[in-house]
Image (spheres, rainbow, N blue to C red):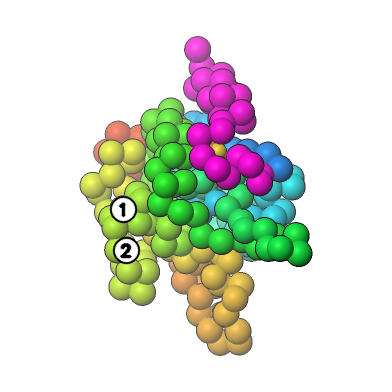
Amino acid sequence: MSVAEEMRKLKERAMSCTDCDLHKTRTQVVFGEGNPEAKIVFVGEGPGENEDREGRPFVGRAGRLLNQVLEEIGLKREEVWITNVIKCRACTIDKDGRVKNRPPRVGEVNACKKWLDAELKLIKPTVIVCLGNPAANLLIHKGFKMLEERGRWFESSPYAPFIMATLHPAFVLRQKGEAFERARADLVNDLLEAKRKAESTDKRGGSQLTLF
Ligand code: SF4
């Protein structure tokens, strides 16, 4: 069975998952998308309102920024794999029926990590880029410090020879003025570095010159 076919079957199973309480409030499961044989995988925290509605990861404002940055460094969404730590929107509903995003709980992340684990084992990427602290805490190490460790390569992941973390596009969008420009530049530089690393390394971690 091809990797694409295996990924399709994995997604099919994930779409009906009820292994944590988030299934009660989601509109739909938001599985990863892109190239199932990608050399680069991006991992965010979880779907928000737009993603929950559309059933695709990174389609809101943060997703548009990610698309722009990928385009600036010469990558297309279809070439990479984009996914999240959890596949259903984590939210609270107040007594007036207003829905607000919240960070996923430890139990929810633990229940959901089997899907991310299976995605990454199928793809076998060369490079993983964690977008924001939650993904970095799960995939690099607990207590990840974005200020100090952003953009640094780690080689201890069972999923890929190289893994790093950078700013989540939603965090970049919350910055104002010069802070926004600095954060955006950091994001661009880190993603460019990730692209270079993937281009110069084969899937087993050795050097190669072939590009995408
Ligand atoms: S968040 Fe993950 S574990 Fe929880 S219901 Fe959704 S797919 Fe299943």
Q: Nearer the viewer, residue 183 or 137?
A: 137
Q: Compared with residue 179, is residue 19 higher up or lower down, i.e. above or below?
A: above
Q: Which mark is residue 144?
A: 2
Tell me what residue is drawn at x 67 percent, y 58 percent.
93
Q: Which mark is residue 28?
A: none
The stretch in magenta equals: 1-26
Judge: label 2 CB < 8 Å from ligand 1.
no
Give percent across and percent down for residue 80: 54, 42
What's the residue type where badge 1 is placed?
Answer: Ile
**Is residue 32 rendered to the left or right of residue 61?**
left
Q: Compared with residue 124, is residue 22 higher up or lower down, i.e. above or below?
A: below
Disc 1 secondary structure class: loop
Q: Which mark is residue 140?
A: 1
Q: Nearer the viewer, residue 203 or 61?
A: 61
Tell me what residue is drawn at x 42 percent, y 58 percent.
134
Point out the residue furthest to the top here. 1
